[in-house]
Amino acid sequence: MTTDISSDKAIFERRESQVRSYCRSFDAVFARAKGSTLHDAKGNSYTDFLSGCSSLNYGHNDPDMKAALMAHIADDGIAHALDMYTGPKAEFLEAFERLVLAPRGMDHKIMMTGPTGANAVEAAIKLARKVTGRTNVIAFTNGFHGMTLGALSLTGNSGKRRGAGVPLNSVTHLPFEGSLGDDVDTLAMIEAMLENDSSGIDAPAAFILELVQGEGGLTAASRSWVEGVARLAKKHGAKLIVDDIQAGIGRAGDFFSFDDMDIEPDMITLAKSLSGFGLPFALTLIRPELDVWKPAEHNGTFRGNTHAFVTARIALEKFWADDAFKVEIAEKAAVLTGRLQRIADMIPGARLKGRGMMQGVDVGNGGLAGAICAEAFVRGVIIETSGADDEVVKVLAPLTTPMDQFKEGLDTLAEAARACVETRIAAE
Amino acid sequence: MTTDISSDKAIFERRESQVRSYCRSFDAVFARAKGSTLHDAKGNSYTDFLSGCSSLNYGHNDPDMKAALMAHIADDGIAHALDMYTGPKAEFLEAFERLVLAPRGMDHKIMMTGPTGANAVEAAIKLARKVTGRTNVIAFTNGFHGMTLGALSLTGNSGKRRGAGVPLNSVTHLPFEGSLGDDVDTLAMIEAMLENDSSGIDAPAAFILELVQGEGGLTAASRSWVEGVARLAKKHGAKLIVDDIQAGIGRAGDFFSFDDMDIEPDMITLAKSLSGFGLPFALTLIRPELDVWKPAEHNGTFRGNTHAFVTARIALEKFWADDAFKVEIAEKAAVLTGRLQRIADMIPGARLKGRGMMQGVDVGNGGLAGAICAEAFVRGVIIETSGADDEVVKVLAPLTTPMDQFKEGLDTLAEAARACVETRIAAE
Amino acid sequence: MTTDISSDKAIFERRESQVRSYCRSFDAVFARAKGSTLHDAKGNSYTDFLSGCSSLNYGHNDPDMKAALMAHIADDGIAHALDMYTGPKAEFLEAFERLVLAPRGMDHKIMMTGPTGANAVEAAIKLARKVTGRTNVIAFTNGFHGMTLGALSLTGNSGKRRGAGVPLNSVTHLPFEGSLGDDVDTLAMIEAMLENDSSGIDAPAAFILELVQGEGGLTAASRSWVEGVARLAKKHGAKLIVDDIQAGIGRAGDFFSFDDMDIEPDMITLAKSLSGFGLPFALTLIRPELDVWKPAEHNGTFRGNTHAFVTARIALEKFWADDAFKVEIAEKAAVLTGRLQRIADMIPGARLKGRGMMQGVDVGNGGLAGAICAEAFVRGVIIETSGADDEVVKVLAPLTTPMDQFKEGLDTLAEAARACVETRIAAE
Amino acid sequence: MTTDISSDKAIFERRESQVRSYCRSFDAVFARAKGSTLHDAKGNSYTDFLSGCSSLNYGHNDPDMKAALMAHIADDGIAHALDMYTGPKAEFLEAFERLVLAPRGMDHKIMMTGPTGANAVEAAIKLARKVTGRTNVIAFTNGFHGMTLGALSLTGNSGKRRGAGVPLNSVTHLPFEGSLGDDVDTLAMIEAMLENDSSGIDAPAAFILELVQGEGGLTAASRSWVEGVARLAKKHGAKLIVDDIQAGIGRAGDFFSFDDMDIEPDMITLAKSLSGFGLPFALTLIRPELDVWKPAEHNGTFRGNTHAFVTARIALEKFWADDAFKVEIAEKAAVLTGRLQRIADMIPGARLKGRGMMQGVDVGNGGLAGAICAEAFVRGVIIETSGADDEVVKVLAPLTTPMDQFKEGLDTLAEAARACVETRIAAE
């Protein structure tokens, strides 16, 4: 019976809420996955250039994580322990300290939040408000930080915001780099607004930003802009929160998206690929002097997913013990840039967006971008759009994708783009 | 190396945020768990009367769920698929429809929210506001609904609320049954406030309530009170949201806490024991006519945890295909009531709280309740308090606890209580 | 031309906003007024039982105030001086200190707010929030405190509240005495809510209340209830704000509505009859230790209306230098009670409301109350309704109304009531 | 006794709240005033270059208004009539229609709000929110719109905002022309933010702006910028509210500050000089199709100050029946520009601000500007600063100031400036 059910989509139509979304783009029932390949119930296979929106940076079912997780479960390892002490938590903390924090000279405390990025963001802004005694938080145009009320108030997308049903308050949205046109100095504008004691922009508790805007169109902030924001935050007594949920953990090129910049974020939110295996897991890093939480002042049932501790530790040890993975990402990123440029060259006005393994092509409108993604899916590549108008074809391949499969997938994407461009020309 | 790390608590002190809490009550590093028994790294074992705050209603590492999950992983089953269609999701939906909804004549749609109870609650109040065009939500004193900004605004606890750092708005808190004293008719009071067009209480989008207040002191609302609230909600055009995150999935005696009441909630939130295995998983049930979400209007990376689909389906099939489990719960609940009464009888003014397998003893103050729990831990039972002043010793044993272990654990609890009472008497 | 214009209502229809209201009940163009009598442009005269909603407690154009104001203007006295020092302000302050504060042992500072009651209320809650560092303010069902955003959030009436267009926040509305039925102890309920640390009612910056609810149906709080609220406020670190805008300045029987109670309000708002002459003027009294405003932290162009200083001083000296006026009010109040009882006796279920010269008859519904007022107007008495459903016929005669005119007006009101009752009976 | 009191400042220190402000700059007790001259209790006289912050555009005690007001009072004309129909109201409406609206082809309805500018602003934003069903209002940096909660949320000044004690919400503050530097195109920036569907700036109910920022530093928006804002408002479905409380009624050169621009504001707020005599009076003009108020949906005791109706009508008839007054203002404005330029020339970096009879000199910092005003006061000229840092010496002389007195006052101001500049030089 199982087989029949699993390939029959009637149950979704009948029973799952209309809010479901990705399934509308990818008309298949998926069954198995390994590395960068997904298999559906009918036996078709697909190259995954979506990676669970950057939640599967190491691909599906990495064999080492898989083995460790199965061993843990086989041994009746803890699955759920609230925030009690467990061996897997200790091992994760130790690995994170040794492989992530120590090499960077960071001394942040690790806060296990509820296992969603939104929850990590909510914790960060709560703490910034508590520490500063201020309420206003500065977020940026086209930012995406989650869908719970506090996180949603930071998010730019109007469709998502309207879902709140109440005004979203105590946040000031200022322009992200480039959002007012390439020639407008948004940093100067932000500085002028903050320096003006009658601007109506209340003294901020925090700035929160993504260095590469995952949902907002793959806009990557420059080093100088980010450092400028960090400087302004410091000057105005605001905490700097880097939301590295989508751009972190290798996606933008290194473990953190800011690793090559001269900033010291007060807080950093991580989720998505943190577990390494696609399991729900999120945390907020906090500079030690800001860790003034009372016990349980922000709590939750699933903070600290023990299965995720197991796989996350393996991921850190396997991929971040030396620079090899970073070098591999850089090589693939270079290939990606080259291939995307060829696609951009097909489309008048198109331009590349993003950096590292978080790149895409802004094709000018959501209609064309959507058509390219749909064509790619027909050809066996799973890929999605990004941006305020869904105008960017966004490649979020697993960072571990073998080079051959990666290039093949990019070839397929180029074919899809070419088909759409030709169709458009024919229609004119 | 692993062994040393996992039994050394220095790493937690050094690296984990001060916000951690349960670990402060239970001074051990846990390693393995099976059924109702936890084992620490030093080889000690404990009976679990906390169950991950009701997230482990079927105990730890249920063998059937464990086998299914291991088979799924071994076969490179999907771990993460955003909200795309997968076989395990189809099977879960089918089982939930067949075993939960259909027998109750319910036709609710299933919304996969982010995998935390707070996220399910946030989704529910968003939808209620969207559907009604109203902003105010009525919540009740001593209610607990989560820690993200929207959920926190519904939560009563002042310590948690202060953590928000901003005023929590668009919620009216009205008195839960019994909260103004046993002789005060809170339902009449609520009705009078709502009927008065100049009460200052804006027309509500929804009422949200727990039928047994898990964090608020195990207060169980009576059938007539709950039905009265449901009637008022209907009369005033408000949606009725039952938060069954802690009281549902068998804890209060049946799958839903309201199964023996004549109400038809518009929305129901589930999380905690939903996966059956302690994995992060949450959903919101929505009456079909209210399912007016636009695609992705509330979204999130981890909505629909595929591993959890696997275990949750097994849980439904194993425990809810017939009435046997419900009967078993009732038997244990009766034992629990009897044993708790004996404890209450030791303490002047103490009284029983709760219902089903969600019962406890209000011992009058948090100091005594905390002391009893601490004494129980020394004797090998993990148990926590509940209530505004932590005044209730709360038993949340796995529903599957073997009767012998259950009685033994309750004996231990009674000993702990007796020890505390005697110490107190001696001190006077 | 002037004469024609002034008796032609077309200009109002053509040019004045639909928001106008009282003019809809009283179909006349008024020209002159003296004492308790209004004259319209056609030569009709009316007894004024509305008094500008208690803004004309000393009647129209009191001869002494009139003379002083004309002398002031004739002498090119200041009309407008922002909040600079002027002679009339000094004289007003001195008279207020000598005749109002000193006899009561009060040491409050006088804050000249914008010349509306709403502005005085906004200033009071700002200061309470500033002083306490808290945001929540407790207001009461059926309270009316004004229509600007802060004041409106305190007001109970749902029609007024909907006008805000945004959620009204940071206020908790609790039940006023009697609002849940005569037998419900609202004070105990409020106390229970405040004592419960998990009630969801955030620690209040202030309680604000009217001792007799002018717009809310003339409900008069008992001495014990008011003292109980004062006690609770003190216990919970909240400031007590008495809104005496409508009930103060003689209306409820003495200068302040709380003069016979054992309370010491932290702040008191006054407006309406403060100028004595119907001129816009408002102030907030502040206990000296709470006067921590920075200069201009709450400002406004018209705070301190100099013409009003002139008349207000005369009013204080003429009416409040000894007890004679208070005795006169008490005598009229007794007459009023007796006459209203006769009206109440005509109507099954009717009951008296209010106290002092702020009394009325709750006739059970707005239809009948409105009909009585309309009948009274036809007979030459201007009178309005009050209450959530406009169910109270409210007598707000000038306190200075000659006894004969007062009784005659009340006779007319009784005739109007009788006519309505007979019409109703005939219709059945 | 009166004389002594009125010249003794001890009463203010003893009894008036610390919030008082202008009196701190002008150390005198004022007694009488006529035209542009104020007299204090000691017999000193002062030229008034403050005009009640533009509330006395026609000077003090204009003889025609004075005569009409005295006649009205002498005849027992109405002083207070709530919003009932009165002769003076009809005459004011007729005059306003005939002399203000009709010549401009405007068909706005006149809403009598509470008699403060803040109240007129609160009414306007309420209505914009009601009409559009949106909550967000766009206000501009350095704008000042009042101190009640709704108006304060629109105001830029941080000191004033902090007085609220709660977060000020549902308003987006965008940069006024020039506020980001002379070379930054703020209009383009605003347009880009509004066009971006992911900017996080919710669709606005209204834009509210002053064309010359009275408190914000006398920045005058250019015709093209204002028309651009009007165009953006229309395009985005937002209502355009011109706050003409300080810049209107002749101050900026014509009756409305936008009379020479091609815009049609949906709403206009007026107060300050509206009565002509310095009496509290405010109104909101509303395009007729937006006048969807329910009766009393925004109400208040003092809306429609009858004394002010009398003087306001005279003011309209005397000054606005033909172009003579406008021509006179233009002549004086030209003189003002020339004289202020001479002052600016004394101070390195100083520059002129404003337009019409609402001009000043930005001297670069508040210390110098304050010193100049203090020096001017010593020399018999009352004048104040403006701007976020009080850096502008602001001339707000009565528009009716005789040319000789005007020039003399400006000479005095120049002397004061020279003295300060010399002192500064000497100190270096």
Image: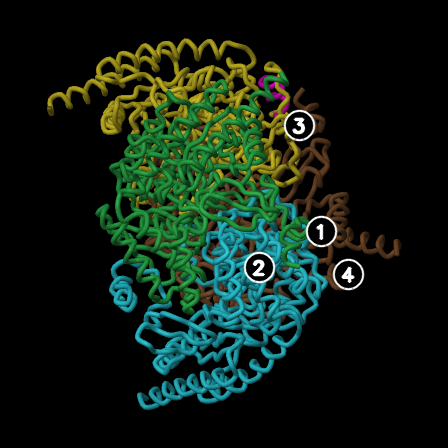
Chain colours: A yellow, B brown, C cyan, D green
- Coordinates of residue A391 in the picture (x, y in percent): 29, 26
The region drawn magenta spans A93-101
Q: Considering the image in quadrants, where does the N terminus of chain B appear?
A: top right
Residue that label 3 marks: A289
Q: Check contact, mark 2 vs mark 3: CB within 8 A.
A: no
The reply to whether label 4 and label 3 mark residues of one chain is no
Dot 2 alpha-carbon crowd within 10 angstroms: few under 14, some 14 to 19, many 20 or more: many
Q: State the residue at coordinates (11%, 25%).
A: A427
Do marks 4 and 1 both belong to one polypeptide chain? yes
- Badges 2 and 3, same chain: no
Label 4 crowding class (10 Å Cα cut-off): few <14, some 14-19, many 20+? some
Q: In the image, what residue type sits under mark 3?
A: Glu
| Neighbourhood count class around disc 1 (C-alpha, 10 Å): few under 14, some 14–19, many 20 upward | some
Q: Position of residue D372 (x, y in %)?
A: 55, 29
Find numbered disc 2 in the image and state the secondary structure of the residue it sits on: strand
Can you identify the residue that label 4 sits on? B347
Subunit that carries the residue with mark 4: B
Callouts 3 and 1 on one subunit: no
Q: Earlier in the sequence, mark 4 or mark 1?
A: 4
Q: Identify the residue under disc 1.
A: B408
Helix, strand or loop at mark 1 = helix
Cβ–Cβ under 8 Å for marks 4 and 3: no
Q: Chain of mark 2?
A: C
Going by the numbered disc 4, the residue's amino acid type is Ile
Q: Magenta segment: does it hold D352? A: no
Give the alpha-carbon distance from disc 4 to disc 1, as whole Å.
21 Å
